[in-house]
Image (cartoon, rainbow, N blue to C red):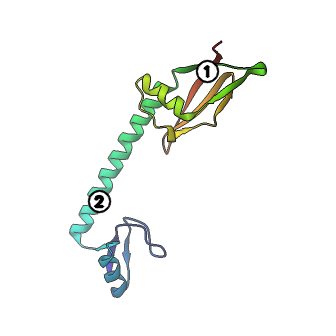
Amino acid sequence: MKVILIENVKGTGKKDEIKDVKDGFANFLIKSKKAVLYTKTSNDVLNKEITTRMNEEAKQLKEAKQLKEKLENITLTFKVKSGSNGKVFGSISSKQISDELKQKGFNIDKKIINSETIKTLGTHIVKITLHKNVTANLTVSVKDGD
């Protein structure tokens, strides 16, 4: 019996694949909502969903590239107290970077900022994962604020 997988099924296949399985296993997959019976109509619905997902993915990729361009043209500056050797009292975290970006009009979640805490003065490059295929390099400048 042919079925269309709605989710990944270990040992059988991945989501959106059309598989030919034994009748009993097909019934199990359908009852557990892991697959639907393959028909012309269900195949048409699958193709429409895949097309919609691809269009949405292309839109998100385009938006991420535009945001990357904007982020790479700005520099965030933090003024902090520091001791000798340029060592900062405290640190600059991804939360602080996210808050500063929000003040500049960018809605960037701290979870996508791939940064170790910054503990020294100077200019640092912080990577921000905007999309699985797009990573922006944000310039963060840490200066002595005494």
Residue 69 visible here: no
Is the N terminus in the top left, top right, bottom left or bottom right quadrant? Answer: bottom left
Q: Give the vertical position of 11 relative to 76 (above or below).
A: below
- The residue identified by callout 2 is 47
Q: Position of residue 131 (x, y in %)?
A: 47, 42
- The residue identified by callout 1 is 141
Question: 7 or 42, which is in the foreground?
Answer: 7
Of circles 2 and 1, the one toward us is 1
Residue 42 visible here: yes
**Which of pointers 2 and 1 lies earlier in the amino acid sequence?**
2
Side of 80 where 95 appears, left or right: left
SS assignment at label 2: helix
Side of 61 where 113 appears, left or right: right
Q: Which residue is drawn at 26% across and 56% down?
A: 48
Q: Which residue is drawn at 41% across and 32% down?
A: 107
Of all residues, the one furthest to the top in this rendering is 146
Question: 131 or 43, which is in the foreground?
Answer: 131
- Name the amino acid, label 2: Asn
- Name the amino acid, label 1: Ser
Q: Give the vertical position of 52 relative to 95 (above or below).
A: below
Q: Which residue is drawn at 46% across and 25% down?
A: 70
Q: Give the vertical position of 50 relative to 2 (above or below).
A: above
Distance of label 2 from label 1 (alpha carbons): 48 Å
Q: Where is residue 128 in the image (x, y as percent from the top left)?
A: 53, 36
Mark linked to residue 120: none
Question: 51 or 98, which is in the foreground?
Answer: 98
> Residue 104 appears in which quarter of the rendering?
top left
Q: Residue at x 29, y 57 (%)?
A: 49
Q: Where is residue 15 in the image (x, y as percent from the top left)?
A: 39, 65
Of all residues, the one furthest to the right in this rendering is 85
